Amino acid sequence: MHIEIREAHAFSVLAESLSFTKAAASLGVSQSALSQTITRLETKVGFALLRRSSRMVILTPAGETVLVAVRRLLQTESNLQETVQAMTTATDPSERLIPVRIGVAMTLLLGFLPQVLSQVDGILPLIRRMGESRQSRAFAHGELDIGFQRVWETAGPGLIPVGSERLLLACHADHPMATASAVHVSDVANDRLLLFPREVAPVAYDTIIRALSKSGRHQPFVRHYEDEGELLGLVACRVGVGIVPESMARLRSPDIAYVRMAGPEAVSPIAIRYDSSSTGTTQIAQRLAAVASEVLSARRR
């Protein structure tokens, strides 16, 4: 699923005004065109974002959750445009930034990557949201320099493991486990689980399946999702529960509770893959890895 910036912007403007008339005027489009854009977005995410009536527009719980992710996406795009402008207008060569093409899963883009990049200067991160499978194809075609991935692999040419983060249960705020201090996989093994397709992040997928198998119970998958905004929307709609990395907790909603998963298996790895044929990229990857390891260590302190 690919959400276009213009679709995200249209939804954000409509959510702000809660009026198709006002939003269409602000965007400079017809109400019909705006309605088609919102309908297309709802089709992509798989659930209703709005409740419409002749007098008003109201965000659904899923719409409120997706709005948080949409605003972060738009802010990221805005920051990128400002950074590119600063890079292209710098007169001092020492102030010019090195463009670095970075692939990153949404779960790392939300909370982890911003912490890392804020401590590494001299680079212009050109960020593309993609899972491990898409990153592998992008590396093969020379389209990526660095990828932040969730893989259990030993260090070697082109790969630097940097640590891991806890897995959390994402459930509706009314779920019986919502107020628990920690839960085991067996505590929710009879709940309906929302899980991403394995090809999106094979290692993270296998980590969850392995934890379920060790609980001695089998999980009835309701459906696979491809976008974290979709997952949280489904949780908010009480469709099921999800097991997510702790970085996802940055997406807050009054309808969603995050509970720490207990046990040694309840962790998700993080590693940096890079183009080892480039000396410059290797040096940048090493700098990023050092900062990333420190960020993860600080979380555990």
Image (tube, rainbow, N blue to C red):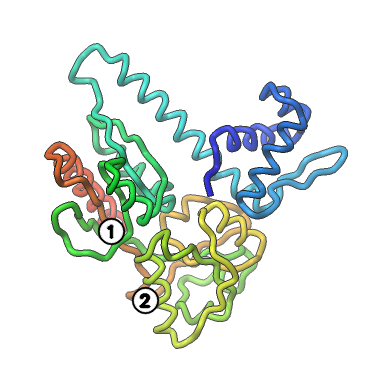
For mark 2, give the secondary structure: loop
Mark 2: which amino acid?
Gly
Which residue was labeled with disc 1?
301
CB atoms of marks 2 and 1 within 8 Å: no
Residue 177 location in percent, x, y? 56, 72
In the displayed structure, does residue 41 sit left or right of residue 290?
right
* Mark 1 neighbour class, 10 Å CA radius: few under 14, some 14 to 19, many 20 or more: few
* Residue drawn at the location 14% of the way across and 54% of the way down: 157
Judging depth in this view, the residue of 263 and 10 nearest the camera is 10
For mark 1, give the secondary structure: loop
Q: Residue furthest front?
A: 141
Which residue was labeled with disc 2?
263
Q: CA distance from mark 2 to mark 1?
A: 18 Å
* Residue drawn at the location 31% of the way across and 50% of the way down: 148
Q: Residue furthest left?
A: 279
* Mark 2 neighbour class, 10 Å CA radius: few under 14, some 14 to 19, many 20 or more: some
Judging depth in this view, the residue of 294 and 275 nearest the camera is 275
In the displayed structure, does residue 66 sit left or right of residue 28?
left
In the displayed structure, does residue 243 sit left or right of residue 31?
left
Which tag, 2 or 1, sits closer to the chain's start? Answer: 2
Q: Quadrant of the C terminus?
A: bottom left
Residue 15 falls in image quadrant: top right
Residue 238 location in percent, x, y? 65, 65
